[in-house]
Amino acid sequence: MSSEQVALSIVIPVFNEAEMLPKLFQELGRVRAGTLRGEGPLEIVLVDDGSKDSSWNLISAQCQRDPAYIGVRFSRNFGHQVALAAGLETARGSVIVSMDADLQDPPDVILEMLAAHRQGYDVVYATRATRGTEPWGKRVSAKFFYYAIEKLSGVPIPRNTGDFRLMSRRSLMELMKLRESHRFLRGLVPWIGFPQTQIFYDRADRTGGETHYPWHKMMRLAIDGIASMSQAPLRLAYAVSLMLFAVFVGYILYAFIKHLVVGTELVPGWTSIMSAITIFGTIQLLLLGVFGEYLGRVYEQVKNRPLYVVQEIRRAAQEGNTTTT
Ligand code: UDP
Ligand code: MG
């Protein structure tokens, strides 16, 4: 298949989804024969993000069976956002849709996304009208997080929108120019601009396997999101230190005047000194942490490492199986 022939690419990151994959293949087969039949040649790019289960065996068997499938295998787990980036880079379609492997994003919605694309939108987000029975904590934290990141970055980020989205070839080309190592695609895609819109769908619960976003990974995503989209926390550090400086100067003046007018005893100063040390110590550590977060990013970026390492690529038999390291 040459690149001009692929009308639609579907990109799916996969991490320990052996339980879900047969169902996923079946679902994709169904929409291909059904709603997506008239959409021209289609390819499905599966990126195995270093799965420890039999996901890769299932993917490579599927690639053997069906030339529309392309399998990319990472040498280890690089994370969802990076796997997604690799899939988008591999995709050759003139329209590219990314979705999750767990069928929480129903492939039938792709048809509606294509319809919106035909009306002239380069990016179409599929937004969850409902979130199934996701735990209460996840809903609230997601709400807060989207609000914070939007306020801090000044880039409007569609709410309740994961990585289920359609992109035109030209918007994808722009996205691929952003080579930052801590990526938060949900913020970067609105950043590139072009006409963008959203459609709504009901998000189902995971029908098998379990979430790979435990709390610590969600926190990581949140910090990456905020720090990659905004320098507000750095400015906060600046503002807080200025404010403290004023307080500090005030306190010194007060102490001097008191010393000159009343005269000081040694022991009674203990409380104020201790509280000052504690407060300043804590705040300095906090601000150092903020600096560290950004410094770490600069360090990562300066190292200029590739985003990921591919161990193996599997695509249609006539092109041969390539192995890269
Ligand atoms: N995923 C991945 N690498 C990871 C974690 C997840 O490629 O380190 C994939 C996973 O296989 C799925 C998608 O990212 O296709 C979303 O993950 P999940 O469904 O676990 O997240 P949730 O829907 O619970 O937010
Ligand atoms: Mg999921």
Image: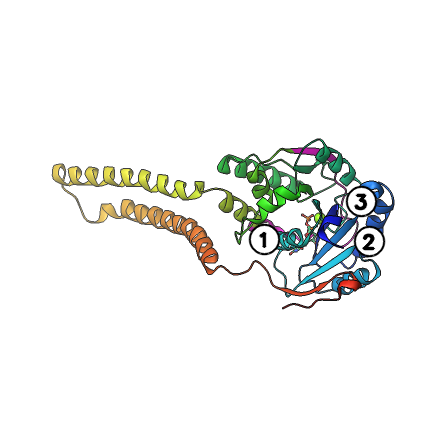
In the image: residue 8, left or right of residue 152: right
Residue 15 location (% of width, % of height): 70, 58
Tell me the quarter of the image containing the C terminus. Answer: bottom right
Residue tagged 1? 216
Task: Identify the image quadrant of residue 205.
Answer: top right
Q: Residue furthest left?
A: 260
Answer yes or no: do the residues labelled 2 and 3 have beta carbons within 8 Å? no
In the image, which residues are magenta?
197-220
Q: At 28% across and 41% down in the image, what residue appears? A: 245
Task: Identify the image quadrant of residue 156.
Answer: top right
Q: At 63% across and 61% down in the image, what residue appears? A: 77
Query: Does residue 124 appear in this view?
Result: yes
Check if residue 208 falls in the magenta segment.
yes
Residue tagged 3? 40
The response on whether ligand 1 sits within 8 Å of label 1 is no
- Say which of 115 and 284 sits in front: 115
Query: Does residue 210 appear in this view?
Result: no
Q: At 69% across and 52% down in the image, what residue appears? A: 91
Residue tagged 2? 25
Numbered disc in front, either 2 or 3: 3
Q: At 12% across and 39% down in the image, what residue appears? A: 260
Instruction: Give amino acid for label 2.
Output: Phe
Instruction: Give amino acid for label 1.
Output: His
Q: Badge 1, how many Cα within 10 Å: few under 14, some, many 20+? A: few
Disc 2 or 1, which lies upstream in sequence? 2
Disc 2 or 3, which lies upstream in sequence? 2
Q: Mark 3 and mark 1: span between their CA atoms?
A: 41 Å
Check if residue 29 falls in the magenta segment.
no
